[in-house]
Image (tube, rainbow, N blue to C red):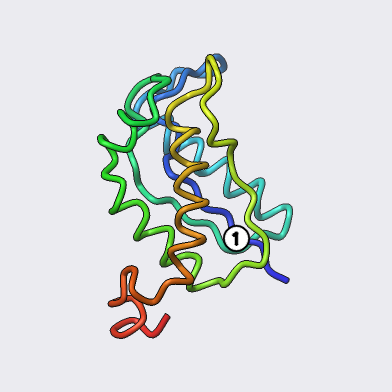
């Protein structure tokens, strides 16, 4: 079986304790490092949803509003329909004190997208026009 990894952001909003990169440069560096690591592990399918790592927040709703929940959900449904996973591992979507809103959103959207991918009425153009 194949492994596919999907990331909402590149982590460009995070801190950098070992270098001078920040913002988009940090996101690019993190992507290169991550792809190298995954290649070593034999993971060939890596997707970035291109959502902005815009700030630290503990608000799930603020993250979903900023990203556009339906847009992200559609991207994830496309990935699920393309790969048809048997297992999905994701972040814990339950809000806990100190848990980043972006992480909460990733977990929630991963679960919702799994269910939406099985519903032909959700993002039906992916089925009719894209053949997924």
In this picture, is 122 found above or below 95? below
Q: Quadrant of residue 24?
A: top left
In this picture, is 103 found above or below 97? below
In this picture, is 2 found above or below 5? below
- Label total for image: 1
Which secondary structure lies at badge 1?
strand
Residue 56 coordinates in the image, percent (x, y)? 40, 19
Residue 6 coordinates in the image, percent (x, y)? 51, 52
Local crowd at mark 1 within 10 Å, few (<14), some, or many (≥20)? some
Residue in the picture at 50% in, 33% down: 103
Observer-nearest residue: 52 or 12? Answer: 52
Residue in the picture at 51% in, 60% down: 114
Residue in the picture at 48% in, 43% down: 108
Q: Is residue 66 left or right of residue 33?
A: left
Observer-nearest residue: 46 or 61? Answer: 61
Q: Is residue 74 left or right of residue 81?
A: left
Residue 25 coordinates in the image, percent (x, y)? 38, 32
Residue 48 coordinates in the image, percent (x, y)? 44, 51
What is the quadrant of the N terminus in the image? Answer: bottom right
What is the quadrant of the C terminus in the image? Answer: bottom left
Observer-nearest residue: 38 or 66? Answer: 66
Residue in the picture at 51% in, 36% down: 30
Residue corresponding to mark 1 = 4
Q: Is residue 78 left or right of residue 114?
A: left
């Amino acid at each position: 079986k194949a492994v596919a990894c999907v990331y909402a952001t590149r982590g460009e909003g995070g801190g950098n304790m070992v270098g001078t990169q920040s913002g988009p440069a940090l996101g690019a560096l993190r992507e290169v490092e991550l792809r190298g690591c995954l290649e070593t592990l034999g993971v060939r399918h890596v997707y970035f949803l291109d959502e902005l790592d815009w700030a630290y927040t503990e608000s799930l709703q603020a993250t979903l509003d900023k990203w556009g929940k339906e847009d992200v959900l559609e991207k994830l449904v496309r990935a699920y329909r393309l790969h048809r996973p048997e297992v999905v591992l994701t972040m814990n979507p339950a809000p806990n004190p100190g848990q980043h809103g972006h992480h909460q959103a990733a977990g929630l959207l991963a679960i919702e997208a799994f269910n939406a991918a099985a519903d032909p009425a959700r993002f039906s153009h992916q089925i009719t026009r894209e053949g997924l």
